[in-house]
Amino acid sequence: MFTNFPLFPEQASVQASQVDGIYFFMLAVTAFFSLLIAGLVVFFAVRYRRRHEDEVGVPIHGSLALELLWTIIPFLITMVMFGWGAKVFFELYRAPAGAMEVYVVGKQWMWKVQHMDGQREINELHVPIGKPVKLIMGSEDVLHSYFIPAFRVKADVIPGRYNMLWFTASKPGRYQLFCAEYCGTQHSGMIGTIIAMEPAEFQSWVGGGKSSDTPAAAGAKLFESQGCAACHAEGAPIPAPMLTNVFGKPVTLQSGATVIADEAYLRESIVNPQAKIVAGFQPLMPTFQGLVTEEQILQLIAYIKSLSTPGGAPGGAQAPAK
Ligand code: CUA
């Protein structure tokens, strides 16, 4: 009956049943108390209605037991909602280590996707089932929002910073992708398709066809063509921090503070290099804002990431020339 008018999209990710669980629990609690209270209002109105013109109400002295009961029970129920909701939220928020990473850039009005092995897509996203997939998302222009109803995941795509979204698809199929943030006249057309595939099928999709440079390889070329290598290299005339084994490691700044060199820090250091100067270096780097697109910034970050080996010592040759 509801096949042509489904009230809920199908559950196609591991997250979907968790989100639906808390949603239906809250819906059931809300419905139960709404019916209970509305029913009692009607029942009391009838039961205790005024029967004679001269009838006077009986004074009420209250009941401590009753007050405690209807305070403690709702308190416990809302604490269950809070605890359960927080658990689901944190799981939705924290991608597991080792998730398959994919870069997504939103722009008016399309979704551009780069896979780590070079495949590119527009308004489509192919993913394997049964494997955590982490989207690292940026915007070329305005606020967008990446929403996959069948997976019950949604995250804003924000200009000037990165946002993450992760899911594990559980069922092969084609699912609707929406932009869920009004972003201009063609907002309603900023839609696409998520294609969840069996792992073997996904492998042959990834391997087949028009694979371009991997983001890391494209980033390496940019690193040369944009002149980054002129300073970020051993023995460069103008000393700049070496980028080997920097990703994911703490970096000490001129201010004495320490930051982790994650995607957000690297992006900021490319578009606004003066924001966080590495201890021992001069603020000499020019901004690359406008010289590289959001996609290219992601490629540069992929390249810098590729210079890091697990457990590698940060910057073997990083000693600043003084
Ligand atoms: Cu992009 Cu709405």
Image: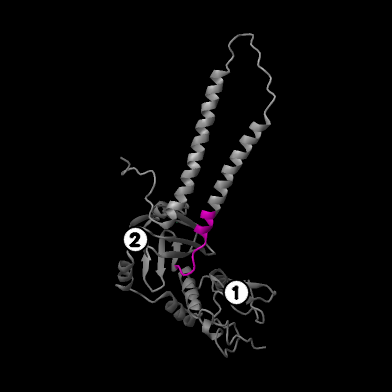
User: Residue 313: x percent and y percent?
Assistant: 57, 83
In-image side of 37 versus 252 (left or right): left
Extreme residue in the top direction: 53
Residue 185 visible to the viewer: no
Queried whether the magenta region covers residue 93, the answer comes back as yes
Q: Residues within 10 Å of mark 1 (few under 14, many from 20)?
A: many
**Residue 83 in view here:** yes
The one of 156 and 316 positioned closer to us in this rendering? 316
Q: Are marks 1 and 2 in contact (CB under 8 Å)?
A: no
Residue ID for mark 1: 273
Residue 258 location, x and y as percent? 65, 73
Farthest-out residue, bottom: 235
Secondary structure type for disc 2? strand
Residue found at the very far front of the displayed protein: 65
Residue numbers of the magenta segment: 87-99
Mark 2, Cα crowd under 10 Å, few <14 / some 14-19 / many 20+, is many
Above or below for 133 versus 220? above
Circle 1: residue type? Pro
Percent coordinates x, y for residue 310 in the rendering: 51, 78
Q: Residue at x 31, y 68 (%)?
A: 200
Q: How is the image coloured?
A: one colour
Tell me the residue at 68%/27% (across/down): 62
Give 104 or 32, whichever is nearer the viewer. 32
Label disc, if present, on residue 195 of the rendered structure: 2
